[in-house]
Image: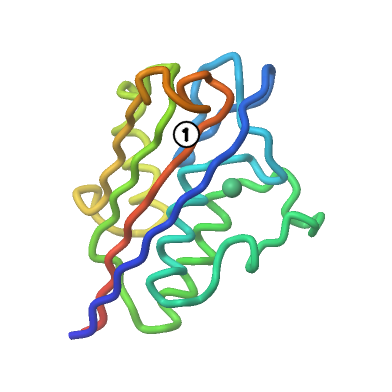
């Protein structure tokens, strides 16, 4: 059995009046991520973890933010494309673990919906998908509510 691990990290600035979408779920908030796509920082970190596990580069290489075809794109669509690359290489997802760092709002009420959304897109069981959220105790750019960051780890297996 061949086992691969990958990690991803992403950051987006927050601005008033934009949509906030995390793990494919729309979050009620006054601010959203500034981005070329829908700004789903958690899915972007996850895409980089999946790509990293197979040394396929990164999301910026695959989906350049200078390309108008990705303007405002739903990041679950990017994730689907990345999933196809994983499958093309003959790998399955064993499990995923994502951490979102954001001071406000509390993300706990959305966590299960986020897990279900990702599991649905990736066609895996929900118990293979972990999504966690943390504040940064008001420290740093996340704590000042200037931005949101996400890290992700993915384990892939090939029988
Ligand atoms: Mg991004």
Residue 69 position within the rendered picture, expressed as x and y whole percent measured from the top left: 77, 57
Residue 53, compared with residue 115, is above or below; it is below
Residue 68 position within the rendered picture, expressed as x and y whole percent measured from the top left: 81, 55
Residue at 24% across, 48% down: 126
Residue with the most extreme front position = 139
Along the line of sight, the residue nearer the viewer: 83 or 105: 105
- For the C terminus, the quadrant is bottom left
Residue at 61% across, 40% down: 39
Colour scheme of the rendered structure: rainbow
Say which quarter of the image contains residue 37: top right
User: Pointer 1: residues within 10 angstroms few (<14), some, or many (20+)?
Assistant: some
- For the N terminus, the quadrant is bottom left
Residue 79, compared with residue 24, is above or below; it is below
Which residue matches tag 1? 25
Along the line of sight, the residue nearer the viewer: 136 or 115: 136
Q: Is mark 1 within 8 Å of ligand 1?
A: no
Residue 108, compared with residue 97, is above or below; it is above
Q: How many marks?
A: 1
Residue at 43% across, 42% down: 150
Residue 102 position within the rendered picture, expressed as x and y whole percent measured from the top left: 44, 27
Q: Judging from the image, what secondary structure is the residue with disc 1 in?
A: strand
Residue at 72% across, 45% down: 36
Left or right: 31 in relation to 142: right
Residue 84, compared with residue 148, is above or below; it is below
């Amino acid at each position: 059995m061949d086992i691969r691990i990958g990690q991803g990290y992403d950051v987006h600035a927050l601005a008033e009046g934009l949509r906030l979408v995390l793990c494919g779920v729309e979050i009620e908030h006054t601010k959203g991520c500034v981005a070329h796509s829908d700004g789903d920082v958690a899915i972007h970190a996850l895409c980089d973890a999946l790509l990293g596990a197979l040394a396929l580069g990164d999301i910026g290489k695959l989906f350049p933010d200078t390309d108008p075809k990705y303007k405002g794109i739903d990041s679950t669509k990017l994730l689907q494309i990345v999933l196809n690359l994983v499958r093309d290489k003959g790998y399955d997802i064993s499990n995923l673990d994502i951490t979102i760092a954001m001071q406000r709002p509390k993300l706990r009420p959305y966590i299960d919906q986020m897990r279900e959304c990702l599991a649905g897109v990736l066609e895996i069981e929900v118990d293979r998908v972990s999504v966690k959220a943390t504040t940064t105790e008001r420290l740093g750019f996340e704590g000042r509510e200037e931005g949101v960051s996400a890290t992700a780890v993915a384990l892939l297996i090939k029988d």
